[in-house]
Image (tube, grey):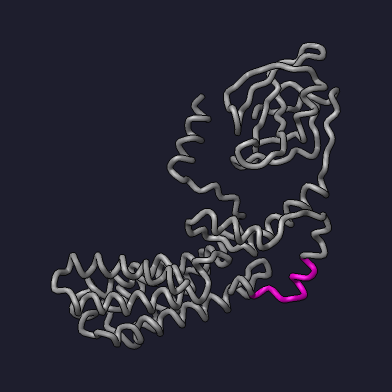
Amino acid sequence: MKADWLRETALVLGVEQNNTSHAEKLVSSLGGLIGIAVVYFLSLEHESALSSALIVASMGASAVLVFAVPHGALSQPWPVLGGHLISAIIGVSCFKLFDNILVASSAAVGLAILSMYYMRCLHPPGGATALLAVIGGPSINSMEFAFVINPILSNISILLLTAIAFNSLFRWRRYPAHGITTSQRIAAHKRATPEHNLTQEDFTAALQQLDSFIDVSAEDLSDIFERALRHTENHDTTIAPASIATGACYSNGKLGFHWSIRQITQLSGNLIEYEVVSGQNKGETAHCTREQFVIWARYRVKRQEKQWVREFQLLSSEEVQPC
């Protein structure tokens, strides 16, 4: 089916499944506008127009992170500050050590990535700063290590201060991400009443086992898990065999590989025919009794903004929309 092909293609290409509200998108955009405007204005006060334009281009990528992904691990103050400073030092050093620009620029970016990893300040725009220190031209190269202090340090400091001030204006944003108060943390954990065996250390161990940098912290994962527990507790549903409707979609509520969505294609007395429309065994068709189906099914779902969500208010069979 065309829709399935398009969804699979989007997943292969890594097209972002973004459910961010329009307000959040606009806030992020406004933050980037203000942040770069302040950095650019102050840069023009101290540098030539050419070098300022180059520096602001390097800061633009950081602005995307601190204003659009303020809770992300790559966006926090130390990655932003340390990533740019370390990369700038490496970039200047490589330019001075290697006569060949190709070797110098390649070494600068590669060593910057390695250093940021070990210094725990991985910040993608740092690679651009390292490269800029090598290929920025005479106006940049002539600064040598002064380039690290002014304009890099000064510009990063301005951007960070602007991000902290701007993000603090919106109660749902935390920058730095650890900026949530102790009282808020206690209140959040009190709301998470369900008992479970998973711990903060389990999330940390899981991230380590992936052996790949993930732009989320163990703290964020545990917060997501607690919110998911509250969500399932507040909206627990039981499916009655008689409520099963043709065209409706149901989830088994499992996680990862074992998760799947079934759509009812035909009802004939107590017999159900269904198709697996998402998850494990997608495309498979089968049949069973109503009683067997409700043992498998945990709740009814529907598509909302390209995501599967619970359908708490069950529709009548006439109101069911295709999945």
Q: Position of residue 204 (x, y in %)?
A: 61, 61
Work out which residue is located at the far top of the displayed protein and give it.
268
Residue 260: name its quadrant. top right
Residue at 20 percent across and 84 percent down: it is 142
Q: Between residue 154 and residue 231, name the one nearer to us.
A: 231
Is 33 magenta? The answer is no
Q: Between residue 250 and residue 158, name the one nearer to us.
A: 250
Q: In the figure, 253 relative to 150: above or below?
A: above
Q: Between residue 151 and residue 318, name the one nearer to us.
A: 151
Q: In the figure, 91 relative to 149: above or below?
A: above
Q: Position of residue 144 (x, y in %)?
A: 24, 84
Q: Position of residue 174 (x, y in %)?
A: 63, 70
Q: Is residue 158 rendered to the left or right of residue 238?
A: left
Q: In the figure, 147 relative to 186: above or below?
A: below
So how many labels did they put on this image? 0
Q: In the figure, 162 relative to 289: above or below?
A: below
Q: Between residue 148 and residue 24, name the one nearer to us.
A: 148
Residue at 37 percent across and 77 percent down: it is 86
The range drawn in magenta is 179-188
Is 187 magenta? The answer is yes
Residue at 81 percent across and 12 percent down: it is 269
Q: Is residue 2 rendered to the left or right of residue 317?
A: left
Quadrant for the C terminus, please: top right
Residue at 30 percent across and 67 percent down: it is 109
Q: Position of residue 193 (x, y in %)?
A: 83, 58
Mostly what secondary structure, the magenta segment?
Answer: helix
